[in-house]
Every structure is written in structure tokens, then in C-alpha cells.
Image: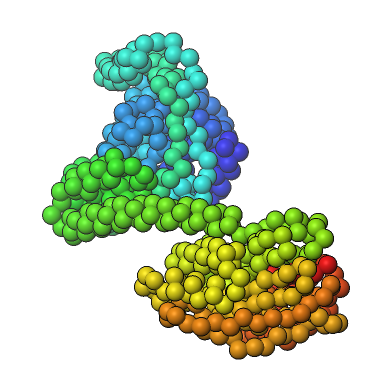
Amino acid sequence: MLLFSIGITFLTIVFLEVVNATEYINFEIVIIPVLSLLWGPFGVLGFVIVETAYLLVCDPNDYIYTVKVISMLFISNMLLWKLWYSVMNRDGHEIPNFNTLYNIIKFFAMFIIYLIVAYILLNGLIKGNSDAMDLYHNMIMIFPLSVIVLIMGIHIAVKYKIPLYTPKKRLRKILPEKAYTIMLISAIIIGMANIILVENEFYSTIISILVMALLLIYITKPLEENCVIKEDININLFNKINSSLFILLLILLGLATVPMYIFIPEEITPNEILGNFSRVIIQYMTLMLIPVLGYMYYLEKNMTKPINRLSKSLSRTINKEEDYQMLNDDLNSITVNNELKSLAGSLLEMEEDLNLYREQLIEVTSQKERYETEMKLAHEIQDSMISKDFEKYNNGENCEIWGLMKPAREVAGDFYDFFKIDDDNIGFVIGDVSGKGITASLIMVKAMTLIQDYAIHLDDLSEVFYEVNNLLCEGNVENLFVTCWLGKINFKTKKLSYVNAGHNPPLIKQNDNFEYVHIDPGIVLAAMEDLPYETHEIQLKSGDAIVLYTDGITEANYNYKDFYGEERLKDILNKHKNEDLKKIIGSVEKDINDFCENKEQFDDTTMFAIRLK
């Protein structure tokens, strides 16, 4: 910060010398309030180092004057920096900005104190010196330009996130809070009395040194809390309009002083010109400042404050009912009678709609979670009903069994089952309920339970389907039907009895390969009552195998481009025909996944296989 301040000051002075702008006016002073307010002690120190060298180069013999001027510049600008952070801050200690009318009034009040202190020190330290008064007149003349440069500095610092220097709480408080204020007031009173009452230059200097000591004590005043630079600080609308007004004010001041350049008599000295210019600027500033501040008050009250309130209200995170109430209160507090009030009303209506939507969303989400929980429970119940105790038969002497069921949704309409009828007979079944979801799964459970119960008690499988069909037709308001294939094997005779109700033909390996057994498939279950079904028989031998499946196998597809098909199913079975049933069914499952590129399927996938030993 110190090196930056030195560099800026040096470049400014070099530029002013090149354009020959330093003959009567010390234009470099325009940047010291900016350096002070933005970078504090480092900014002021960097300026006074370069300014000291510059004054000594210009007049090396008058070093006492240089020391006095530099002392005045250092103390007055350090006071300007301390006043910004010490005077009451409505939003806590914040970096210099013109985002509110309060900050603008505060800045002008501080600058008046700054000019008063500069006047007191210059008159007290260099009493009667015309150069000192010229310097003071310079400070007044370039005040509007200082404001413009300060606005530009704040814009640049905020836009490019340049770190500023702010006073810290760490300084130890050696005096009570009010004592520091008393020191400042006392310094101003003593300094003014020094100018009016004391004529002796030596005594005036001594008193001025006392005044500087009092001001230095005030400058060391610690803050009650550290200054926090808000991360979301920005150049708001009010600030941008103020910037435009200040620029306009500077132009008007410039136009007001143009006649003075034109009609200056030759006998008037440069000192008199500077004095006249400073008085004109003070007069115009006084006349213009009151209406400008009044306009800014109107602007802030009717535009920028309501806009800022809208912005802050809408950026608040809303999680609880209290947050909605706070937003309601904020929007209702906008009392302006213009478009902003209409906007606030529209936002209130939108907030009410959002609140209603939020309540509905919570209810829908709750229902969805409850539905998902129920579906998960239904899946677990259904999964527990599907027989998986394959090892009980695989370890025996009669047969080998394996099955697979993959629901397309949480619950399935497909099913398979196998059950012991007696010591010599085993029953097995596969089925597919039309439709999906809970209703289909309920029909599936009902059909599976009825089939097992009747198959155990009735010898003829066609009678089993006759009875089950009639029972499924009762109360079938959804008009769902069931395709089903039921078989029974006698281990002693190795005879297979089976009945088909509209289901896919099974594949049976009796010789070397699996082949489809095509017969009249019959009518599906639950279509209508009192339908006849026919029992068929096939003589098997050891090593023969039967594979049952649902249409979710043969109709598996990827984006409806092609079906897996019966031929591909038969080919993969024959490719692995000599392996155990678990591997055979696993190979079919893998081949289907490869065919469908592992995409999610639209139908349940179910298979069942049994092989005689």
C-alpha cells in the first residue's frame, strides 16, 4: 500500500509538471483525500514522502515551511480517515462509499472538519504566510475534483476487489470514549482561538503543536469492533446516480468560474485570484448542495430504499414459516405510491402462491414417500413369496431346479413357483398377469396361492385350472387376465403332466438340444368362467430338462428396435445345454442384457428350469 501510494503520487506530480499545471495550484493535493480514505496511514505516508521530496527540490532552502506543510497534510488527512470510521455508522464500520444519503452528508461534514483543521494548522504554524493561504485556497478549489476522484477510486476498488486499509480494534484504549471526542473539539477551539487572539508567531507555533498533539491523540482512538468489509458490497443505483450528480456539479462549478478567467484584470495577483476562486466555489457549493441533497433525499426515499428493501427481502433464504412472515412484513413496509408498490404487491401475491405451492409440494412429497415405502414393503413381501430354496432339491436324488424373476417395477405381475405334492410328485408353475403395479401383483399372489393349493389336492391339472379360473374371474373389475403354464413330474415314472392357459411354449431338452413344445395354448385364466382346459403328458428320462419363461424374455428389446425372440433364446440355451441350470439361466440373463445394451426393461423377466437326475 505504501509503495502504491508513493508510485501514484510520483506519477501525478510528474504529469502535472509535464502539462505545466503547478504554477499557481498544487493539483497533486487532489489525490491525498483519496489515498487517505482508501488506504489510511500507508496512503497518507506515501503521499507526504513524495510531496516532501518535491517541495524540497522546488525550494531546498525553505525546509521549515516544508515540514510545517507536510505536518498539516499528514494530520488533517489522517483525521479524515479516522473520522470516517469513528463517526456513527448505521450499518457498522464499512469502507467509504456513497451508497446512502447518510454517508454523503457524513462525508461532507467530515470534509468541512478536514478543511477547518487544515486552516487552523496552516494559520497557526505559518502565520501570515501568503503561500500557506494559497495552499489552503488550493484545497478548497480542488475539493469537487477530490470528490470525483474519490468516487472513481471507490468504483475501481469495489470492481476489482482491491484491498483497503481499515482501522483495527487492536489498539489499546488509553482514555474513556468521550475523552477522544473532547480532544477533537478542544483542538478545534484552541486552534481557532490561536488564529484570532495570538499574533506572536512563536507562541502561535507552540499552540499549534499542542493542537496537533490533541489531534494525534484522537487519531489513535480505537474502534469498539473491527471493521468488516462486506463481501457483497457493490456500487448500487443510488451511488451511480450520485456520481452523475457530482460530475454535473463539477461542470457547473467550472462554468461558473469561466467568467473569472475572461475578465481578470491584469493588476490582480495570483494570490488574489486563488482567494476569489475559493470563495466562488464555497458560495456555489453552499447554494447547490442544499437542493442537490434534497433531491437525493427524495430519490433515496422513493426509489433506492424500496429497491434495496426488495432486493434484500427476495435474497433472504426462506426455510420456516417465520421467514415467510418476515418477507411479508418487509414487502408490506414499502409504502411508496409508484410502480415499486405495484411490484411489491405482485411479489406478495407470488409469495402467497409459492407458499401454497410449497405446502402442496410437501403434501405430495409426503404421499410419494409413503407410496414408495408401501411399494418397497410390497416388493419385499412379494419377493419373500417367490420360492428360492433350490438347494433343497438340487442336493437330492430326483431333480435339479433353478429360477429367476426380475420385476420391471417395484412389484411384478410375473411369478414362478415349485412345490412338493407328495413324495413322488413335484409341481411347478410359471405365470404372467396382464398389467403392471399393485393390482397385477395382487392378482399374481392370488393366482399363485390358488394354483399351489388346488394342485396339491387335485390329480388332474386341467381341473386345477378350471377351479382357479373361476375363482380369479370373481371380482375381476380390472379385467386382468393371467397366462399360466402348470406342470407336474412323477419321479418314479418320469412322466410330465402339464396344462397351458395361453402361456408361451416351453423348451424341453429330451435328446441333444432344447426344442419348443408347441401345442394349443388354451385360454388365459380370468378371461371368463367355466372354461375347459386340457392336460397333456410327455415321457421324460434322466437328464431331460424343461425351461419355462414369460414374454418378458422373448420380447426384451432396446427402444422397440428389435425383439430378443424365441430363436435367440433357444440358441443360447443349446450353447450352454450341458452346464448346470444356474449357469444356463445366468447365461440367458447376460445375453438379454447384452442385447438390450443394459438398458432398463419395460416388462418383468422370469424364467424357471427343472432337470431330472
Point 49% across, 18% down: residue? 171
Most distant residue in the left direction: 337
Could you say where residue 286 lies in the image, as x and y percent from the top left? 21, 42
Q: Pick the quarter of the image with the C terminus.
A: bottom right
Can residue 528 be seen from the camera position used here? yes
Could you say where residue 314 lies in the image, as x and y percent from the top left? 32, 51
Q: Which of 235 and 28 is in front in this view?
A: 235
Point 32% across, 14% down: residue? 178
Q: Which of 426 and 209 is in front in this view?
A: 426
Question: How many numbered circles does the render carry?
Answer: 0
Residue 414: image quadrant is bottom right
Q: Which of 453 and 98 is in front in this view?
A: 453
Residue 609: image quadrant is bottom right
Residue 156, above or below 116: below
Could you say where residue 104 lies in the image, as x and y percent from the top left? 29, 41
Could you say where residue 566 lies in the image, as x and y percent from the top left? 69, 85
**Please, which colouring scheme is shown?**
rainbow
User: Image check: 182 left or right of 588?
Assistant: left
Q: Pick the quarter of the image with the N terminus.
A: top right
Point 44% across, 80% down: residue? 530
Q: Which of 608 and 101 is in front in this view?
A: 608
User: Image check: 401 left or right of 304?
Assistant: right
User: Image check: 118 left or right of 159?
Assistant: left
Point 65% across, 77% down: residue? 498
Can residue 246 be seen from the camera position used here? no
User: Image check: 591 left or right of 536?
Assistant: right
Residue 334, above or below 175: below
